[in-house]
Image (cartoon, grey):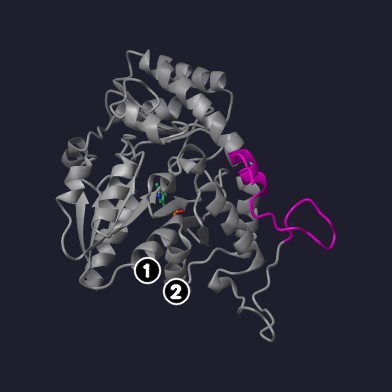
Amino acid sequence: MKKSGVSTKCVHSGDLIDDKFKGATSPIFPSTAYDFVDVEEDRYPRYFNTPNQKALSKKIADLENCESALLFSSGIAAIYTSLFSFIKSGDHVIFQSSIYGGTLNLVIKEFKKFNIEYSLVDSFVVNDYEKEIKNNTKIIFVESPSNPLLKIIDLNAIANLSKKYNLISIIDNTFSSPINQNPADFGIDIVLHSATKYLGGHSDILAGTLASSNSNIDKIIESSINYGGNLSEYTVWLLERSIKTLSLRVKKQNENAIKIAEYLTTLDKVKSVYYPGLKSHSDHELSKKQMKGFGGMLSFELSDLDTAILFTRKLNLVKSAMSLGGVESTLCSPSLTSHSKISKAERENLGIFDGLLRFSIGIEDSEDIIDDLNQAFEKL
Ligand SMILES: Cc1ncc(COP(=O)(O)O)c(C=O)c1O
């Protein structure tokens, strides 16, 4: 049978049919108590198997070209559940060092309590990951594009390395969304999202997802039931509704982002622009190979922190906000938010200078976003 296109998957995959009243949208089944007599399986929200959970999980799995998926109460719940489903005391995990700050915090604060070792690799060269592999290594965890400099790692090479040493490869695919990148197509084992960002898309839902093979999901579900990080039925329903427009939103964000990135490169007041869609980006060729769209995230650098803050204050349409992936354009200073817990020297070592602003492009008209940026630049 012909496979559906991605926009059709967003609207229809995993449709929960309203047989009773023939409504066009999915009904909500909020029950936490289900019959236990003559049933195929015990149904309970914390078992990740209610009708709404199953329907939306099917949509996520289809969008990520995976066999199966699970929904969580936050991105970080999806992240810790996937990690702790595969590791035990004495094991070792390799992380790309430029991952989401909350994931780093989880690793640094929690792993030592359970005697789990880790290595942080400050590199996008896959050989540097191979150097860190030890007898007790179980997982390689990456994020691409990275936060906030939008650097790209070769997904196929990471997947092959993981297979060579019998490791699980995990990617946080939040920045791309399933519209722009499907890591499973390159052999990555587990694909995570903070659904709080692009999947939810309206800055009003906290959720997480993971997608993988049936056998990995069977293993993860055993632990998930114990950790209890499932998503509430009402939020499952809202997230399903949001994802119906995911493809439209992300395509508009991609279109806006390249226009804004190009505009920013023309300005003397902007020292650098980081966007994988720009030919000048160090990983442009690799991103063309593994991304279907370059995404709605970009960063640009002004002279210093004071200028960056002054610029942020002068914006009218674009809001200052710590999150990303919403329909509205927002920006934030990594030095004051995601990377505030590391020293200025360490930040600069990573290429994150205080004048850097991370920009989450919304779905407004690009001309209006550029007008707003322009009037703010004129006031510097
Ligand atoms: C890339 C990325 N991954 C994971 C997370 C964590 O997601 P949540 O806040 O939904 O737990 C975030 C949150 O900002 C993020 O930006």
Question: Which x, y percent locates residue 171?
Answer: 37, 50
For the C terminus, give its image quadrant.
top left
Residue pictured at 66% horizontal, 66% vertical: 51
Image: 332 above or below 255: below
Element type where label 2 sits in the image: helix
Q: Residues within 10 Å of mark 1 (few under 14, many from 20)?
A: some
Q: Is residue 233 left or right of residue 333?
A: right
**Residue named by callout 2:** 222
Magenta region includes residue 21: yes
Mark 1 vs mark 2, CA separation in Å:
8 Å
Question: Which x, y percent locates residue 96?
Answer: 26, 48
Residue pictured at 64% horizontal, 75% vertical: 32
Amino acid type assigned to the residue bearing label 1 in the image:
Ser
Question: Which x, y percent locates residue 12?
Answer: 67, 48
Q: Earlier in the sequence, mark 1 or mark 2?
A: 1
Mark 2 residue's CB less than 8 Å from ligand 1: no
Query: Closest to the observer: 176 or 324?
Result: 176
In the image, which residues are magenta?
A: 1-27
Q: Is residue 238 left or right of residue 282?
A: right
Amino acid type assigned to the residue bearing label 2 in the image:
Glu
Check residue 280 in the rendering and tell me which mark sits there, or answer none.
none
**Residue named by callout 1:** 85
Magenta region includes residue 178: no
CB of mark 1 within 8 Å of CB of mark 2?
yes
| Residue sitting farthest toward the right | 21
Overall secondary structure of the magenta section? loop
Mark 1 residue's CB less than 8 Å from ligand 1: no
Q: Residues within 10 Å of mark 2 (few under 14, many from 20)?
A: few
Question: Which x, y percent locates residue 61?
Answer: 53, 54
Element type where label 1 sits in the image: loop
